[in-house]
Image (spheres, rainbow, N blue to C red):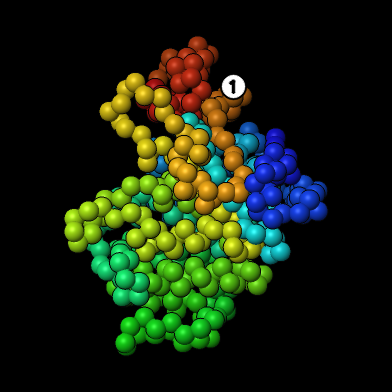
Amino acid sequence: MKTCGRVFFHNARRLAAHKFTFTEVRYLSAQPKAESNIEVGSLSEIQMSVAKHLNLKTHLPSPLSKQMDTLGELVTLIRDPMMEIASCMRVVDKTLPALRLVLWGAFGTGKTVTLNQAVHHAYTNNWVIVHLRSAMDLTRRVKEIEMSSFVPGRINDPSNAVAVLQNFKQQNQHVWKTLGELFTERDYEWSKSERTAQGKPITEIIEMGITAPFLASDCVGALFRELRRHAKDGKLKALVAVDDANSLWGKTLVKRADRTYAPPSDLTLVVHFRRLIANDWTNGCVLMVADKKEVADARDELGVSRHTPLELFGEEGFEFVEPFLPIETTNYTESETNTLYDYYVRKNWLASKSARTEEGRKQLMHLSAFNPYYYERLCAFN
């Protein structure tokens, strides 16, 4: 398995841009591995109460959410990418810039599942979690808009802003008391009648945005600003997990007053998330997924799918997220499919007699071409 240090050396050019010294690189690679209850190739169960707490039913891929409902439990396979992420999270320190990781790989190889496993790992280690289900929600699934009163030309998105704050509140109940003991650095004047004074708990910003949707977009920005500041001070560690992160530099379906499509840089929430994934703060980890949904054409049956970070983020996005550590998700190995097959047999997920034979086991492997998504779908219908 790759170690954090090896990936750092592999990306020496990016490290130079990041202003890491070789002493810091040696420090990262020499860190002892902390004890962990996760092991490559093993099945890990997330308690249903925790899954509900982290809102995983909404954030996981639809087939896995349905499987969770049917089996009454959430069990996932621990693979190399997750171990790599856990290894990197262990070396996060308030003296080093936020570590940025990009999950990339072909369709169905487990990028979103790995992202959610990392969110659970952050939860078990009492990190603050900022988890965006999909960056496309901010650019393509916008129900209502209003113009910002703070920045001319900036477009607010009240409904998505409230959803971000509500999700943050739900996922961070395990550290809510700690967040309530962290105070604002300055006064925030939301409107003529609404304000949050300096020295107030930052949880008041969250409550303000949830109860007043027309202020929610600005509350998201203030919350992210305070989280970055407190992380720098060593008062918290934060995981920023963004699925379909390349969509922050993609197309939008939001129209200006002149009926032209607004670029992502005009959307308030996109700007706030871009600032959050920048590496100008410390004591945090930014985990992004590069997914081809942003650029793929479902009607193109002949084109070769693009899934590398450079192709998916584009020149502007790639320059913004550099330096980062690329972590590729791949197809299953034979031992991984065997582990899942045995689990499906035990849980009676495989219903047909032919599928529960040795010949059926081999056919499922090869018909799916060891692709995690297709393997699960074949098992669900056999």
Image point (65%, 59%), residue name:
97
For this view, does 93 lie left or right of residue 178?
right
Packing grade of label 1 (10 A; few <14, some 14-19, many >=20) is few
Residue 94 location (% of width, % of height): 69, 64
Image point (55%, 34%), residue name:
329
Residue 269 location (% of width, % of height): 38, 62
The foreground one among 216 and 354 is 216
Q: Is residue 78 visible?
A: no
The foreground one among 38 and 267 is 267
- Secondary structure, mark 1, is helix
Residue 100 location (% of width, % of height): 59, 51
Q: Find disc 1 in the rendering and name its residue.
A: 334
Image point (53%, 86%), residue name:
199
For this view, does 126 lie left or right of residue 60?
right
Q: Is residue 85 above or below residue 369?
A: below
Mark 1 residue type? Glu
Q: Is residue 235 above or below residue 271?
A: below
The foreground one among 366 and 242 is 242
For this view, does 87 lie left or right of residue 310?
right
